[in-house]
């Protein structure tokens, strides 16, 4: 009888993991600098001219199609967990636009001969589980033999034109709500160093596999002006995109920021990703820390979040009611973290 192939540690086959694999904001801007504009296509409501979460195409007066793709290398060794995390992260872009996902296509790259077939199947099964939770099928996909393990989804969704929520529509006077705690990148760095216990790991996976489906409900509220999800560029990077898109300033009260339970302690122990430093260097001085905040806070606010929460810009009078609605949807760590003010565009942490 042939013995089953032994599982391999997926993280040992990848030079990076999760949304920490993303190119830094400055590199991405350079690569996209000469991309063709979508102005010739009036039905393209959201394209690469802005730094939004997904593309949006208006079919008719009632329906917009939302399209996105996201994939990365493993940040955990459990194959099923990797699939679940990557799928949750990819679907989030549709929710961040205020949409409802319809179907997904799988994107798979495996180093043939290094990852046993049962592990590759477990990755796909984990992704399919999350898609089933979101109420959508995995309708197909594409696979290649690659040097490092890669998995993700292309996701299609829809929304009425009036319910599309962009990341460039925040208004002065708005309050900012963050729906999930920060610290995933720091936890993933600690995981690779063997610093997480079982409870830490469960906390990390739980937040990364929590679907941001509340985004669709938030887009039905006229008081919610802008949405984005916080992923590889960290809270500072995605908040700065929101600020630059709308030409506003953002002030965040760090005492209000929800963090995974050991985030600060692990960061102070040196468990930070290289991506946080690359992110910070890309902000070109547009993100500032109050003098009372030490250098560790630079890593905290630029920490890449894999399958992070939504950043919600909402009219201040509706902030408390909106926060209550988000918590009722299962995001018990959601918090009002700051305010939106007049420009110039930038982000300040106090």
Image (tube, rainbow, N blue to C red):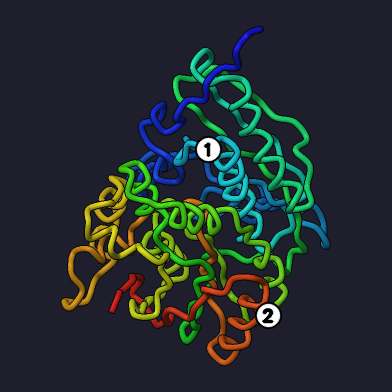
**SS of the residue at dot 2?**
loop
Residue 15 picture quarter: top left
Q: Nearer the viewer, mark 2 or mark 1?
A: 1
Query: Of 127 and 337, which appears nearest the observer?
Result: 127
Query: Of 262 and 142, which appears nearest the observer?
Result: 262
Question: Which percent across, then down, holds residue 272?
Answer: 28, 51
Local crowd size for mark 2, using a 10 Å CA cut-off: few (<14), some (14–19), many (≥20): few
Residue named by callout 2:
222
Residue 265 picture quarter: bottom left
Quarter the N terminus occupies: top right
**SS of the residue at dot 1?**
loop
**Residue 137 to residue 346: above or below:** above
Question: Which percent across, then down, holds residue 317?
Answer: 57, 92
User: Is 266 positioned to the left or the right of 260 in the image?
Assistant: left
**Residue 184 to residue 274: above or below:** below
**Residue 189 to residue 303: above or below:** above
Question: Which percent across, then down, holds residue 325?
Answer: 66, 80
Q: Earlier in the sequence, mark 2 or mark 1?
A: 1
User: Is 50 positioned to the left or the right of 327 in the image?
Assistant: left
Residue placed furthest toward the front: 1
Residue at 68 percent across and 62 percent down: it is: 213
Residue at 64 percent across and 70 percent down: it is: 330
Name the mark on residue 78: 1
Residue at 58 percent across and 64 percent down: it is: 166
User: Is 21 positioned to the left or the right of 271 in the image?
Assistant: right
User: Is 180 positioned to the left or the right of 214 in the image?
Assistant: left
């Amino acid at each position: 009888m042939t013995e089953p192939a032994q599982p391999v540690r997926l993280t040992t086959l990848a030079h990076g993991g999760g949304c920490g694999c993303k190119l830094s904001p400055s590199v991405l801007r350079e690569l996209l600098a000469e991309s063709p504009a979508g102005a010739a296509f009036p039905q393209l409501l959201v394209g690469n001219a802005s730094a939004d979460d997904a593309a949006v195409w208006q079919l008719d007066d009632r329906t917009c199609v939302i399209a996105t793709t996201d994939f990365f290398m493993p940040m955990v060794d459990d194959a099923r967990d990797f699939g679940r995390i990557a799928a949750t992260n990819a679907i989030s872009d549709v929710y961040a636009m205020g949409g409802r996902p319809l179907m997904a296509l799988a994107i798979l790259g495996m180093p043939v001969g290094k990852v046993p077939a049962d592990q590759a199947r477990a990755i796909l099964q984990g992704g399919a589980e999350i898609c089933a939770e979101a109420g959508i099928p995995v309708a197909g996909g594409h696979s290649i033999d690659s040097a490092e393990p890669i998995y993700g989804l292309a996701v299609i969704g829809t929304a009425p034109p009036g319910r599309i929520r962009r990341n460039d529509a925040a208004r002065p006077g708005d309050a900012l709500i963050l729906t999930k705690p920060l610290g995933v990148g720091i936890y993933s760095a600690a995981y690779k160093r063997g610093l997480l216990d079982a409870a830490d790991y469960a906390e990390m996976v739980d937040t990364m596999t929590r679907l941001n489906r509340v985004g669709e409900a938030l887009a039905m509220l006229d008081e919610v002006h802008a949405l984005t999800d916080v992923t590889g560029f960290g809270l500072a990077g995605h908040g700065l995109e929101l600020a630059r898109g709308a030409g506003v300033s953002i002030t965040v009260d760090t005492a209000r920021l929800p963090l995974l339970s050991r985030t600060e302690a692990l960061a102070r122990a040196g468990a930070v990703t290289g991506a946080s430093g690359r992110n910070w260097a890309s902000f070109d001085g547009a993100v500032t820390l109050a003098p009372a905040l030490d250098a560790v806070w630079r890593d905290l606010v630029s920490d890449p979040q894999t399958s992070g929460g939504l950043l919600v810009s909402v009219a201040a009078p509706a902030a408390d009611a909106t926060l209550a609605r988000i918590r009722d949807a299962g995001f018990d760590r959601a918090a009002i973290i700051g305010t939106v003010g007049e420009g110039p565009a930038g982000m300040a942490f106090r």
